Image: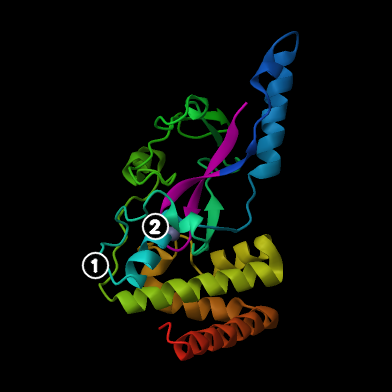
Amino acid sequence: MGEGASIYNCALCDSYALVTLGILPERKLARGPNGLARYEDLLEAFQDARCVASALLLACPTCNALARATEEGASAKPGADQVEDGDFLRDGLAVLTPCFLVSFEDGQPPPVYVDENAAKGGIKPRYRLVQGVGPAGLELDRSRTGRLHKPSLRPFGIDVRPLSLDDDAAATRETMSEACLFAEALTSCAGGDAAASVVRRAGWVRGGDPPRPALERWGEIREATEREMDEDAREYVRARRVVGGLEYEARRARGHL
Ligand SMILES: [Zn+2]
């Protein structure tokens, strides 16, 4: 037994990381007559049920590193390993960005991985493919956030050009917060599937010529997304901005800012 994980791609910064999807069927089911076939059916059923095509709002390590770096005024380089052992998850301040599970072959669902070292405790994870079509093993980077070492995906047809942002920390912060709000509005009002099609049509994923991550060209994506949003999602954005503004004023009035 182990936890099944899939690779996701963040639509905002174009980084790749692992997300746990659930508990895999017991390996011991593969024993006995027809055991292996039954076990493989269960793995396939797990993949069919969990490896969805909709947009998932996840705490992408790179986007959280950027949000933290800019909030704290640090001069950290975008995409650097600034996420200290997942602190952003524990303190409840994570930003959630729209992400998609990654498939490596047209028409195939995203592959499922398991950490072979999970039961051993305290040692470096080692992910291997258990179901579907994809790289046999995965190389994590050193951030200990489940993020993959992007250059290791080059042989599998992944564009590995690094994120390139200018140094305006305030502009990056504004972009992050607005993009997260748009994504939240779309998924809250219309659900993951509808959000996924809006996000794709508006060019968050592999858009531009040459294709560049959404975070690098938020201006054009912002306009396209606003055109695609329905009135409910627009209203959601307006309402959240009012609440955000009131919270900001209240904190400032109490001397917290
Ligand atoms: Zn991201």
Q: Quadrant of the N terminus?
A: top right
**Residue numbers of the magenta segment:** 1-19
Badge 2 is on which residue? 62
Q: Position of residue 253 (x, y in %)?
A: 47, 91
Query: Compared with residue 82, is residue 172 higher up or lower down, i.e. above or below?
Result: below
Is residue 14 one of those drawn in magenta?
Answer: yes
Badge 1 is on which residue? 75
Query: Compared with residue 73, is residue 257 higher up or lower down, i.e. above or below?
Result: below
**In the foreground, 182 or 243:** 243
Q: Looking at the image, in which quadrant does ligand 1 appear?
A: bottom left
Q: Quadrant of the C terminus?
A: bottom left
On the picture, is 174 further left or further right than 118? Answer: left
Residue at point 62%, 78% (across, down): 229
Looking at this rendering, what residue extends furthest in the front direction?
254
- Determine whether the beta carbon of the residue marked 2 sits less than 8 angstroms from the nearest atom of ligand 1: yes
Q: Residues within 10 Å of mark 2 (few under 14, many from 20)?
A: many
Q: Position of residue 176 (x, y in %)?
A: 44, 71
